[in-house]
Image (cartoon, rainbow, N blue to C red):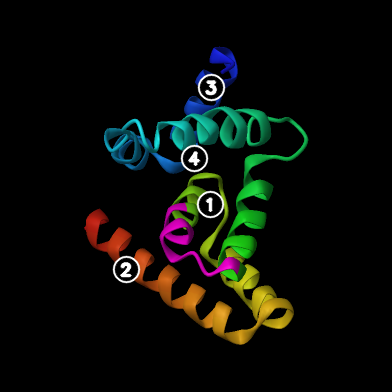
Amino acid sequence: MDKALYDKGLAVRRAVLGDEYVDSALKNVDDFNRPMQDMLNEYCWGSVWGREGLPRKSRSMLNLAMISILNRPHELRAHIRGALTNGVTKAEISEIFLQVAIYAGVPAAVDSFRIARELFKEMDAKEK
């Protein structure tokens, strides 16, 4: 493992998804899933998210579309939060999911809109 890349990835992961989310993922690390968490931090978040080629906002927008299409609701919730952190607006998220409807199917978009609305409602309730 490349320690510098791992540390960079962990910092990017925390900046995008938040400490609470990352801490929750890491507290459940054991011998079985440690290789996966190491790979996520080093490769996904360090090697790819840590690149300069695209701004984080663009990466977030791409992720929302791809994760919607893959029907991964848990990951979608996390990445909607991350997208907001990275400057994606609710209006832009809506547009992304409309694009998903046209190119990947209405059911994927309907679920994505539902997940986003539920998350926005939870986030708004916490702010009050």
3 and 1 marks in contact (CB < 8 Å): no
4 and 3 marks in contact (CB < 8 Å): no
Is residue 30 one of those drawn in magenta? Answer: no
Residue topped by disc 4: 16
Q: Which disc is residue 121 wearing?
A: 2
Spatial distance from mark 4 to mark 2, Cα to Cα?
Answer: 20 Å
Q: Which disc is residue 83 wearing?
A: 1
Quadrant housing residue 8:
top right
Q: Quadrant of the N terminus?
A: top right
Q: Position of residue 59 (x, y in %)?
A: 66, 47
4 and 2 marks in contact (CB < 8 Å): no
Residue at image position (36%, 64%) is 119
4 and 1 marks in contact (CB < 8 Å): no
Horizontal relation, residue 39 to residue 17: left or right: right
Spatial distance from mark 4 to mark 3, Cα to Cα?
Answer: 15 Å
Name which of mark 4 and mark 1 comes first in the sequence: 4
Quadrant housing residue 68:
bottom right
Residue at image position (64%, 68%) is 96
Name which of mark 2 and mark 1 comes first in the sequence: 1
> Above or below — where is 74 with respect to 60?
below
Residue topped by disc 3: 6
The type of residue carrying mark 3 is Tyr
> Above or below — where is 87 with respect to 49?
below
Name which of mark 4 and mark 2 comes first in the sequence: 4
Spatial distance from mark 3 to mark 1, Cα to Cα?
Answer: 22 Å
Which is the main secondary structure of the residues drawn in magenta? helix
